[in-house]
Image (tube, helix red, strand yellow):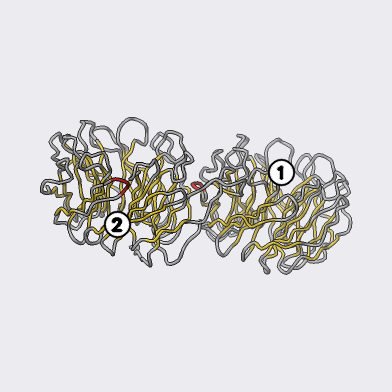
Amino acid sequence: MKKLYFVSFLFLIVVFKAQVAPVCFNSLLAANTMTVGGTTPYEICVADFNDDGKPDIASGNNGTSNLSYLLGLGTGAFATPLNYPASQAPWTICSADFNNDGTADLAAGDAASGFVTLFLSNYGTISYGGTPQCYGIRSADFNSDGFPDLACSSSTGMSIRLGSATGLMSSPIIYGTGGPGRCLTIADFNTDGNQDIAATNNFGTTVSVLLGTGTGSFSPAVTYTVGAGTTYISSADFNADGNKDLAVCVTTAGYISVLLGSPSGTFAPPVNFAAGPNLVSITTADFNGDSKADIAVGNANPKTITMLQGTGTGSFVLSDVYSLIDAPSFITAVDLNLDGISDIASVSSASNRVTSILGSSSGALTAALTYSANVPSVIKTADLNADGKPDMVVTNNTSSGITVFLSGTSGFSSTAVYSVGASPNSLALSDLNNDGKLDISVSNSASGNVSVLLGQANGAFAAATNFVVNVSNSSLVSVDFNGDGNKDLAVAGTSCVVVLFGNGLGGFAPAVSYSVGLTVASLTSADFNMDGSPDLAVAISIGSVKILLGSPSGTFSAGGSFTTPLFPYGVTAGDFNNDSKSDLAVVNFAFDNVSVLLGQGNGSFVTQTTFPVGAGPYSIYTTDLNADGLLDLVTTNNSAGSISVLLGTGAGNFAASTDLLIGTNPRSVVSADFNQDGRPDLLRRVFQATSTFC
């Protein structure tokens, strides 16, 4: 069984604010992870392999000697990988139409044997030997015949194979590079219309440039010293002078060396820019839509992508650092969701997963705004002071209190702490005394009562009044169960559900208890049998959801029981398939997934469908995050330190989860438009020992 560990006491909220042309990525789709069908994928490449107009990803899986194709959906998400065996262990891959049939093919190089293999769509494979230790392979037309050729950076230099209309390649011609090769980039460096090559020496100190003649041959290499530990290299016009420049990962020193080019194909001395530790890969693109080339760098430890924003003069400023769940081994820039904005695809050889990070030109991610609370456990948001801005309420689990945060001009400007019962662990916001102001109800697990704080003017609250429920309660909802126009409360106890009927003045009748027989984890309310009376869905820890059917008088009767995996810690209701019937979504802590049970409109549900999320999902929230009119799901993943976003299709299914690393032990999440930009933002509560940035 998984265990929970809790430390220190910070509450974190992230607000994504608009800035001027930042290098940035969509906050809700920042880590769309997909497992490839093999192990130790060192590189990926992007092309349209199935001719549907959408970019796909191919990975070369060195550990299992196979290839995985992840066919793109055009949204930044991908279908289940298709896997094909490879006769050799691919280390490096690239794509081109090698046999001139109009469909993208693959070329893979093996670092151990030196074999180069072509994977021709619909035509099988062709392997070529004679190239020692192929560490980097890329394609271009070096002899101007209209057919793609191959350049392979190897232990003995640069190996060139000339292509043909059938996909057959010539014997290799090897050019010295002043040392063992590592990675390469191809561009026209001397503006003569011919393709040239720049390559790094394998963890050496130099970059070698070979200028092409346009006939398939190259002039002798010219070397440039950069720094110790050269690995990946990329090219772009960084200073807008019409000449291609170079950017080199200097892994050991932890910086990027930029060499500005000239019309003759020579390069100025390098200028270095810090890019974090453990640089493993680099890619260039205009990520923020300002027509200036930027740089993205993959950092293996910590697991991040570092963004360097180009100024258009050949210099760069550190823009953002993005946390990933997996340590990147290779990254590449591409428009994955066809919105005209550059995205990033990353692969991790350690986790065998591909991550897509969707770009945005409308606002940068800023550092997390940090607000202190005393071991917060649950958060809720609403406009508490009628100023049109969302405020928030947080339960303080160890201090027998709640904290109210009121929105200001930037973030939350004022806070107030109110005493409640012992160990508050759930809350609801509703108008309990019918005065038009929101009130707070808090379930207190250690004191066996519910605290009610009546709202006053300007977001203040009266002192708590406590109502006995005589159970160790874990979850709370506020609904009008008996149709009298007054809000009532339902509280999840250890093995029962307790209902308190409101009198419309902020008071309640004595509690009425309904046994469910087993350990209750959470509850939610909706009209599951469409009779006009609210019902209850109760998540049971041993692996089920029990339904209590409501009546016009507010009494409940036993409904059905529906199977889920063990430890369904959170449950929420919504219409996920647009049939006007309430459905259920349950997070299953022990199985790292979400169960979706589609309602039949009679209080019963079809057999669950499960969707994977991050490790140790603890709570679940439903809202429309992408403004498509369809309900989406968000889970907090306690063990993974992440949230998972599952975008709804409107048919009861959900796209593969997009995971965002957010900090230690996240327990609760809500959504509101915190920065008033018309788009929903996410607010999450975490336990964390030190402050976190996203």
Tell me residue 462's x, y (percent).
23, 51
Residue 540 shows in the view = no
> Looking at the image, which is closer to me, 244 or 691?
691
**Label 1 crowd (10 A; few <14 / some 14-19 / many >=20):** many
| Residue 76: quarter of image | top right
Q: Are marks 1 and 2 in contact (CB under 8 Å)?
A: no
Marks 1, 2: nearer the viewer? 2
Which type of secondary structure does the marked residue at label 2 adopt?
strand
Q: Earlier in the sequence, mark 1 or mark 2?
A: 1
147 vs 660: above or below = above
Residue 75 falls left or right of residue 106 = left
Query: Residue at left 58%, top 58%?
Result: 328
- Per the image, the residue denoted by label 2 is 402
- In the picture as drawn, the residue positioned furthest to the left comes out as 510
Query: Residue at left 40%, top 62%?
Result: 10
- Per the image, the residue denoted by label 1 is 96
Please state which amino acid type lies under the numbered disc 2. Ile
Which type of secondary structure does the marked residue at label 1 adopt?
strand
Q: If the image is split into quadrants, where does the N terminus sit? A: bottom left
Q: Which mark is residue 582?
A: none
| Residue 361: quarter of image | top right
Tell me residue 317's x, y (percent).
66, 56
Disc 1 from disc 2: Cα separation: 60 Å
| Residue 639: quarter of image | bottom left
Tell me residue 330's x, y (percent).
63, 56
Residue 686 shows in the view = yes
Please state which amino acid type lies under the numbered disc 1. Ala
> Looking at the image, which is closer to me, 167 or 624?
624
Tell me residue 148's x, y (percent).
77, 44
Residue 265 falls left or right of residue 463 = right
